[in-house]
Every structure is written in structure tokens, then in C-alpha cells.
Amino acid sequence: MLDFGLNLVRPTADKDHPHELIFQASNRIIMNYYSAKRLAIAFGQIVGRFEQQFGQIELNDAKRRIDRQGQG
């Protein structure tokens, strides 16, 4: 099952948690395991081609920020 939508940040009155993150789903795709595996393989191939062309995609957010600052 894949849900598509928006992540919304909403302010709260709580000083310890000033923001609330809400996911608002607008579309859902339900598929069987066979289709899900084929989709996962296709995504892997697409990401692999992207990384060959543009370099490794960094998953660690902190490292991405450091790398971006160093390029600036």
C-alpha cells in the first residue's frame, strides 16, 4: 500500500513541542506483493542510474547539510 499526500507542519501551543507534523493522504495505491516487488526493482534501477550520473545520494540529513554548505 502506498499513500501519497502532504506533510503539513502546524504550530501548537505546547512550548516543548512548538510544531505538530501531520500527514494528509490524498491518494492510495494498493498492490499485491508481485507488483510491489517489481516497483521496488524499478525504483532501484532509476536511483542507480541517477547516482551514476550525479553521484551518491546521501541519506543522512546532517551530512547533506554539511556537504551543501561546503559546495556554496
Image (cartoon, rainbow, N blue to C red):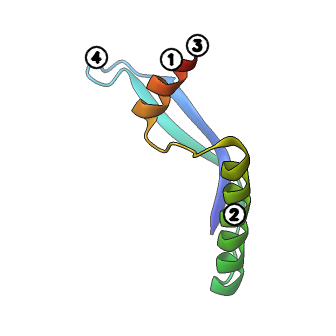
Residue found at x 52% / y 28%: 9
Residue found at x 50% / y 17%: 69
Crowd band around label 4 with a 10 angstrom C-alpha radius: few (<14), some (14–19), many (20+): few
Secondary structure under the numbered disc 1 in the rendered image: helix
Q: CA distance from mark 4 to mark 3?
A: 34 Å
| Residue 15 tag number | 4
Q: CA distance from mark 4 to mark 1?
A: 30 Å
Counting residues from the N terminus, which is met first, the one under dot 3 or under dot 2?
2
Determine which quarter of the picture holds residue 33: bottom right
Q: CA distance from mark 1 to mark 2?
A: 29 Å
Task: Work out whether residue 1 or residue 69 is closer to the camera in this orientation and state it.
Answer: 69
**Residue of label 3:** 72
**Residue of label 2:** 43
**Residue of label 1:** 69
Q: Is residue 43 left or right of residue 23?
A: right
Foreground disc of the pair 3, 2: 3
Secondary structure under the numbered disc 3 in the rendered image: loop
- Which amino acid lies under the numbered mark 4 shown in the image of this protein? Lys
Counting residues from the N terminus, which is met first, the one under dot 4 or under dot 3?
4
Vertical comparison of 7 with 17: above or below:
below
